[in-house]
Amino acid sequence: MLLLVVFMILCISHPSFQMVLVPLTHTLSKAQFNSTHHLLKSTSTRSAKRFRRQLSLPLSPGSDYTLSFNLGPQAQAQPITLYMDTGSDLVWFPCAPFKCILCEGKPNEPNASPPTNITQSVAVSCKSPACSAAHNLAPPSDLCAAARCPLESIETSDCANFKCPPFYYAYGDGSLIARLYRDTLSLSSLFLRNFTFGCAYTTLAEPTGVAGFGRGLLSLPAQLATLSPQLGNRFSYCLVSHSFDSERVRKPSPLILGRYEEEEEEEKVGGGVAEFVYTPMLENPKHPYFYTVSLIGIAVGKRTIPAPEMLRRVNNRGDGGVVVDSGTTFTMLPAGFYNSVVDEFDRPAGPDNKRARKMEAKTGVAPRYYLNCVTDVPALTLRFAGGKNSSVVLPRKNYFYEFSDGSDGAKGKRKVGCLMLMNGGDAADLSGGPGATLGNYQQQGFEVEYDLEEKRVGFARRQCALLWERLNRDKN
């Protein structure tokens, strides 16, 4: 999740490797909306708000992806389901008693059960580095003062028995106040003792918890690297293509914690083994938890449109670059660059009257075309920094969505196609954050690897459902 802010609330009292496979599942279904148009409008709006801001497990499919685990000792373990988000760095969920402000109408499928009871969990001390991390690395003395620790205890650094005070955590589309606790977290056969999480009693527009997979100290991958070092410091996921058709059968997407051995006879694309294309991670002094990369340009057909300077690097204020974000649905581009891409996309589509303007207004996604008027849909390639072998060719379904327009009544339905990229606004309005976001819709059908040892992000074409089946077969 983007535009994340963390600060203090002072006024409120095989021998070489191991792999864990986790299933990710979708959470947003068409059944929650009146129509495909409503669903697209809601999803595109949420992406815009966020922009302004071997063990393998299954990720549930949808416009957002969720994973499940158990919290607490085995005999008393409670199931928890959270959104997976590489754009934030905290694992948190609602705790009883729980109040969510302005949550009416927001999807809440993962937490249909009552908020979690954490009476057996251990509160994190103000002396803990985890508490400092939650409070934006505030000095321990400041944390003790916020917890109303007596002065003599602060001076003698003896405030270990005081609870970590509440902290404030904000996303581009919501916020929360939470405390830190520790307990046992179990993922499949893996048991992590003393796992640190945020327990939220009050949230704004955030009814469901989040599993932060960013680069911060409290993220799930960071804690895995500390509590289960045999997994290493790398994870990947492979998102099964999600559809806005509620009738489509959805399969889990593999979330892979650690490493696995690829089988050359499988996962072939274009007649050869699908190898990873890597691009270096950029460091962001203001948002160190982001997975930020450098975009050199976007090729539409045979012509490459150079990316603006703000997408190629991050300045000393933390502005710029492209964030790879599993928690945002659509890719967001700055207005000028987006318009250049659309103009080039328009060329083979023909005159402007072939645009489905009414449909664009309904869904918030543009441009849209009547397909009987479009002679060609050009290929789209993302060119990242890292050399000539750092380009990612997107499958057509990752950037061009086709469906029937039933608005013509007696005239019959017309096939409509739309470019699934979004205008993120004028560059002048984007100070204080990333220049663009690579959303999960454009990542589907790829295994996306986050290599924190080599500080790089990799992309490889995969048949994600088959990858999930193979990894489970190998595990069994």
Image (cartoon, rainbow, N blue to C red):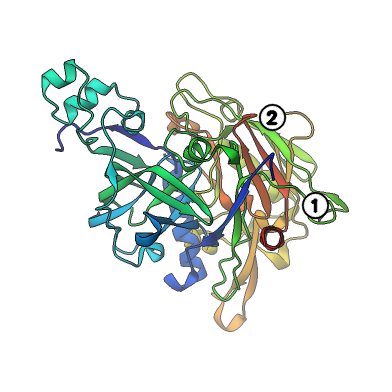
Q: Residues within 10 Å of mark 2 (few under 14, many from 20)?
A: many
Residue 423 appears in the picture as rendered: yes
Q: Nearer the viewer, residue 110 or 226?
A: 226
Q: Quadrant of the C terminus?
A: bottom right
Residue 386 percent across, percent down from the top left: 72, 29
Label 1 secondary element = loop
Vertical comparison of 173 with 157: above or below: below
Vertical comparison of 433 with 71: above or below: above
Looking at this rendering, what residue extends furthest in the top direction?
Answer: 155
Q: Is residue 248 left or right of residue 466?
A: left
For the image, the number of numbered tags is: 2
Label 2 secondary element = loop
Residue 338 percent across, percent down from the top left: 59, 41
Residue 9 percent across, percent down from the top left: 21, 34
Q: Which residue is mark 1?
A: 263
Q: As shown in the figure, which amino acid type bears the numbered disc 2?
A: Ala
Vertical comparison of 308 with 53: above or below: above
The answer to whether the residues at label 1 and label 2 have Cβ atoms under 8 Å apart is no
Cα distance between the residues tagged 1 and 2: 28 Å
Residue 385: mark: 2
Q: As shown in the figure, which amino acid type bears the numbered disc 1?
A: Glu
Q: Quadrant of the N terminus?
A: top left
Upstream in sequence: badge 1 or badge 2: 1
